[in-house]
Image (spheres, rainbow, N blue to C red):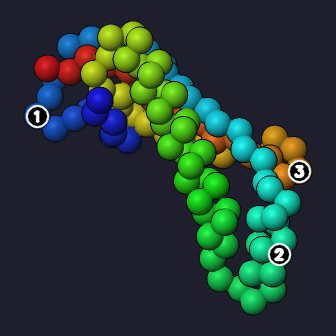
């Protein structure tokens, strides 16, 4: 599956457009990670516990979007975007969306 943020793929022709596909993942923080993150916040710098959590969520959302595109018969997704929103205190949604297409 080809995935790109651009609206076309260099050297490929879009033969068919299937439409919007999306995938999302909602993750909540973990108390153990929160304590470690709070301590790291005091000294500054990256909080790797949250970086890992968000990275896993993005990958899961992308996999779900790809599965939806494959079910439609697509072999590529163009115009991909990623959005994040807070659902409630301590929980965030990662939404990945794009246009499923068949390229030649």
The numbered mark at residue 89 is 3
Residue lying at the far right in this picture: please name it: 89
**Quadrant in which residue 61 is drawn:** top right
Of the image marks 3 and 1, the number of the one nearer the N terminus: 1
User: As displayed, is residue 82 above or below residue 1?
Assistant: below
Q: Quadrant of the C terminus?
A: top left
Q: Name the image quarter holding the N terminus.
A: top left
Image position, residue 49 (x, y; %): 66, 66
64 shown above or below 37 = above
Mark 1 Cα within 10 Å, few/some/many (few <14, many 20+)? Answer: few
Numbered mark located on residue 38 in the image: 2
State which tag comes first along the sequence, 1 or 2: 1
Taking depth in this image into account, of 41 and 3 the one nearest to the observer is 41
Instruction: Label 3, secondary structure: give it.
Output: loop
Provide residue 25's location: percent of width, then percent of height: 64, 36
* In this rendering, the label closer to the viewer, 2 or 3: 2
Which x, y percent locates residue 73? 33, 11
Q: Are marks 1 and 2 in contact (CB under 8 Å)?
A: no
Task: Name the residue beneath numbered marker 1.
Answer: 11
**Could you give the CA–CA distance between mark 3 and mark 1, rounded to whole angstroms?**
45 Å
Q: Please say whether residue 5 is visible from this viewpoint.
A: yes
100 relative position to 40: left or right = left
Q: Residue furthest front?
A: 32
Q: Secondary structure at mark 2?
A: helix
Q: Residue at x 40, y 34 (%)?
A: 79
**Residue 84, numbered circle:** none
Q: Nearer the viewer, residue 3 or 67?
A: 67
């Amino acid at each position: 599956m080809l995935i790109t943020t651009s609206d076309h793929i260099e050297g490929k022709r879009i033969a068919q457009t299937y439409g919007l596909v999306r995938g999302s993942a909602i993750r909540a923080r973990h108390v153990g990670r929160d304590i470690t993150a709070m301590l790291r916040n005091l000294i500054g710098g990256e909080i790797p516990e949250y970086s890992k959590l968000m990275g896993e969520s993005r990958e899961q959302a992308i996999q779900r979007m790809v599965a939806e595109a494959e079910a439609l018969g697509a072999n590529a997704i163009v115009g991909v975007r990623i959005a994040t929103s807070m659902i409630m205190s301590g929980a965030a949604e990662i939404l990945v969306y794009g246009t499923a297409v068949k390229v030649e």
